Amino acid sequence: MCRRRSLRESTPMTHTPTPPPLPLGWHPAPDGSSAMWWWDGARWIQPQNEPSPAPTSAVAIARLAIATQVLLVISAVTSVVTIGIETFGINAASRYLGGDESAIRMIDSYDQLSSVFGILSSLSLLATGVLWMIWQYRVAKQFIGLTRRSPGWHVGSWILPVVNLWFPYQNIADLWRAVGRTRPSWQIVWWLLWVLSNTVSTQASRLTLNAQDLEQFQLAMSMSIVAETLLLAAAPLAWLTVRGITQGILHRSSAPVVLAPAV
């Protein structure tokens, strides 16, 4: 007697491939949310959000940033005063060259003002530069391995000839990225203003030292006005640079920390 095949037996068997196991790590949450959960090979683990206060280093950087910003404002004020003194000097020289003998007293006053305020202006700019480098060094130490150069190079690039024409710009751009912010489009404007200001200021100083007559002194004073104007324009952008990067650090330090289980 022939055995009759059942309907089940006559149905072709299909084999569903077994999906490969998930690797250890972070994956989209199984509940369909936008969160990322940790898969330990056997079970899903939700992230633990622990708000952490700003660490001491971030607070110290914030204080350095405030001091640097204050000195940047002071340097901007000294630039305004220097422009006024140089304008006064040009006017005094023009009057004397025009035959006004009494203008010699104005020239003497200019010499006294420029000598005293020149020292104050230089000290202000030096203090600002030193504090800026300390601030930048402390910031770079927070992101070792995430920038092109070491914290030491973040300081040295401001001092060494030739490399100080471009490396500091790259270093600041790296810090913007490291804190999770997009480098602002005006950063290149700030840098060009700074480089041009230094270049013109150096030429003005050389011309002042080698000037043989009032006409050459007038040219040196005019170049000094140009240099101070460029520096004055760069100051608010430098202020925004310090503020933006520091805010990025404070934001990162106060953000929730996602802890992964030990593997």
Image: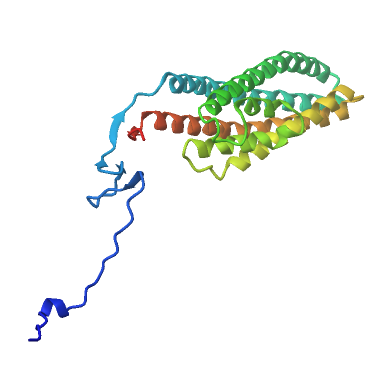
Residue lying farthest to the bottom in this orientation: 1
> Can residue 218 be seen in this snapshot?
yes
Q: Is residue 185 left or right of residue 257?
A: right
Q: How is the image coloured?
A: rainbow
When asked about the image quadrant of residue 249, the answer is: top left
Residue in view at x 67 percent, y 39 percent:
192
Residue 243 left/right relative to 260:
right
Question: Is residue 195 shown left or right of residue 58?
Answer: right
Q: Position of residue 22 (x, y in %)?
A: 33, 50
Residue 59 location in percent, x, y? Answer: 43, 20
**Residue at position x 59%, y 31% in the image:** 235
Q: Nearer the viewer, residue 14 or 3?
A: 3
Q: Quadrant of residue 39?
A: top left
Residue 52 drawn above or below residue 178: above
User: Observer-nearest residue: 47 or 222?
Assistant: 47
Q: Residue at x 46, y 20 (%)?
A: 57
Q: Is residue 191 above or below residue 5?
A: above
Specify the quadrant that holds the N terminus.
bottom left
6 is higher (above) or lower (below) than 172: below
Residue 98 can be seen, yes or no: no
Residue 149 rendering spot, x and y as whole percentages: 62, 33
- Residue at the extreme left of the image, as rendered: 1
